[in-house]
Amino acid sequence: MSAPAEVEASHGEPPRHVSPLLQRRGAVAGSGPDAGVAWHYGDPTAEQRALTRGGAVVDQSHLGVVRVAGPDRLSWLNSITSQELTALPPRTSTELLVLSPQGHVEHAAAVVDDGEATWLVTETPIALAAWLNRMKFMLRVEIADVTDEWSAIGEPVSAEGAADEPVTWRDPWPTTAPGGTRYGPADDEHPGNDRPWRLVLVPRARLVDEVRAREAAGWPLVGTWASEAVRVEAFRPRAARDVDHRTIPHELDWLRTAVHLHKGCYRGQETVARVHNLGRPPRRLVLLHLDGSGHLLPEPGADVHEVTADHEPGRVVGKVTTVARHHELGPVALAVVKRSTPVDATLVVDCEGGAVAAGQEQVVPGEGVSVDRPAPRGPVARGLGVHPSL
């Protein structure tokens, strides 16, 4: 399996730092959105097993960090993003999306406040900080891209940071947040429950020392091969991999954790509400179980085809977004396909050397209706429905 290629229209930025941990013996560099850190350190299967057992550390220093200070920071961020943040308590993790006026995902960020500033961990720190600065007007907020000063370390731990710990973001996925909703599995049945994950922010100059301290406690250093494989298994969307210029959050089941449906207006909210209340997302996320017998794997961006009655690749119904080799599931991928694609359709994925058969596992159901969609009140007059693309 070759290192993953960068997806067209990636929602990430080129790495600004090459991790010193890439100097470790056996380190293989990542590429695309994971350039700058290690893909693995020589034994990706053992690394993934250590991560799933709950005892490993992952270099995530390629991620960006934006710090927002000032007394108006939470109410201001609340007014311009998808998440309810006005009363966010210190050391309580959430996530937000910045949407276009049409409701398409432009930025995603992990969010935690330390009582003095709000920390945003993102894959687009330069663009996000620039957009925030354009939106601050006369409010008392100070925005700084602090990626050059701070690094993230990934840990398989489901705990918020304590008062005596560094700034820590605990991934809320897949628990449906207050004000959110879900299209996919119930919280207690979701495969993401088996993926504890948090990011600890440490001074960039201390990255190696912080990793060594965890290794001294018995946690091996593992690469993004491992962390991406368990992310795919958990159906967890990632902006730099699974988002393109058309993505709305419903398609990735991202209303669970990143969107509050009952807060005030923000850019893109009209599309969010309309699709949730009246429409259906035009595409849906699926997990693909790939045939690995031919030792061929697709690259991100590969076309997904529905197989015809003659057992030949037919119409293109979607694209692969993330490819991973899981130590138990084998080769798997996340893909975004047309909502009209039958949930029992046989699929194949384009691959150099020949097509690869793929069995689909639903993430967002084919009917495209959330669990708490309001019941229809009656027939909708012609011309007053949602846009046909939604």
Image (spheres, grey):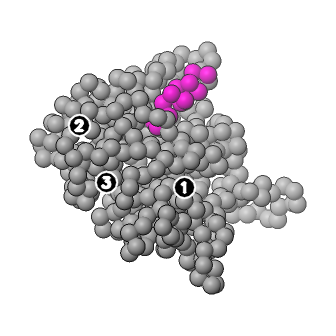
Using the numbered discs, state the Cα–Cα distance from disc 3 to disc 2 in whole angstroms.
Answer: 19 Å
Density class for disc 2 (Cα within 10 Å; few <14, some 14-19, many ≥20) is few
Could you tell me which secondary element the residue under label 1 belongs to? loop
Give above or below for 14 relative to 379: above
Which residue in the structure is indicated by mark 1?
Answer: 301
Height in image: 27 above or below 141? below
- The residue tagged with tag 3: helix, strand or loop? helix
Compare residues 8 and 226 and report the one nearer the observer.
8
First along the sequence among labels 3 and 2: 2
Query: Is residue 369 shown above or below 122?
Result: below
Distance between mark 2 and mark 1 Cα atoms: 30 Å
Q: Is disc 1 surrounded by few (<14), some (14 to 19) or many (20+) residues within 10 Å?
A: many
Q: Camera-side residue: 183 or 149?
A: 149
Asked if the magenta segment contains residue 21, the reply would be no
Q: Which residue is mark 2?
A: 23
- In which quarter of the view is residue 23 placed? top left
Instruction: Say if mark 1 contacts mark 3, CB within 8 Å.
Output: no
Residue span colored magenta? 122-134
Residue 175 occupies quadrant: bottom left
Is residue 362 at all visible to an observer of this figure? no
Q: Amino acid at mark 1?
A: Gly
Kindly identify the residue that appears in the image at 39 percent across and 40 percent down.
35
Q: Is residue 134 left or right of residue 207?
A: right
Residue 236 appears at what percent x and percent y?
44, 54
**Magenta residues: mostly which secondary structure?**
helix
Pair 1/3: label in front? 1
Q: Residues within 10 Å of mark 3 (few under 14, many from 20)?
A: many
Q: Earlier in the sequence, mark 2 or mark 1?
A: 2
| Residue at point 28%, 30% (across, down) | 202
Residue named by callout 3: 226
